[in-house]
Image (spheres, grey):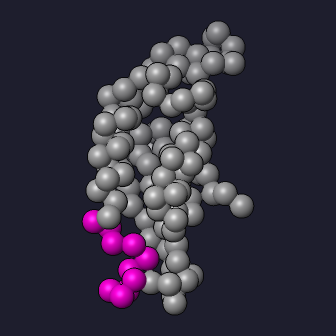
Amino acid sequence: MLTISKEFHFSASHQLAHLPTDHPCSRMHGHNYIVVIELSAASDALTEAGFVRDYRDLAELKDWIDTNLDHRHLNDTVPGRNPSAEHIAMWVHETWSRQLPELTAVRVSETPKTWAEYRPS
């Protein structure tokens, strides 16, 4: 199995529900997010050029992130979910897994020391 990844960045605000009122994440705040997608394929499933997927094919995902997530309030953008890093990772995977069948995981960081990863079983 071969794996590639690509990193994307966006800045956005959110306010998390279901937390105590004194929890800092219950107030509106923002982050400089990092999204890393992971794509995997068996060695016999590589493209003729020897790629899991050409990185240039991911330009549409970058455009989608820039349009739908960058400088947005995620409570208004991530449909039907409390916009935690975990839910954002799941939503990105669900949104893009049909278009990118090699997509095996999505990681989301809100701060330099925190990451959430969605890797469907």
Residue 5: quadrant of the picture: bottom left
Residue 69: quadrant of the picture: top left
The answer to which of 98 and 77 lies nearer the viewer is 98
At a point 46% along the width and 22% down the height, the residue shown is 76
Locate the C terminus and report the quarter of the image it occupies: bottom right
Does residue 105 belong to the magenta stretch? no
Looking at the rendered structure, the number of numbered marks drawn on it comes to 0
From what the image shows, is residue 21 above or below residue 7? above
Residue located farthest toward the front when viewing the structure as drawn: 98
Chief secondary structure of the magenta span?
loop
Image coordinates for residue 32, horizontal then vertical, percent: 38, 36
From what the image shows, is residue 14 above or below residue 56? above
At a point 51% along the width and 68% down the height, the residue shown is 102
At a point 63% along the width and 18% down the height, the residue shown is 17
At a point 52% along the width and 57% down the height, the residue shown is 98
From what the image shows, is residue 108 above or below residue 39? above
Image coordinates for residue 66, horizontal then vertical, percent: 30, 40
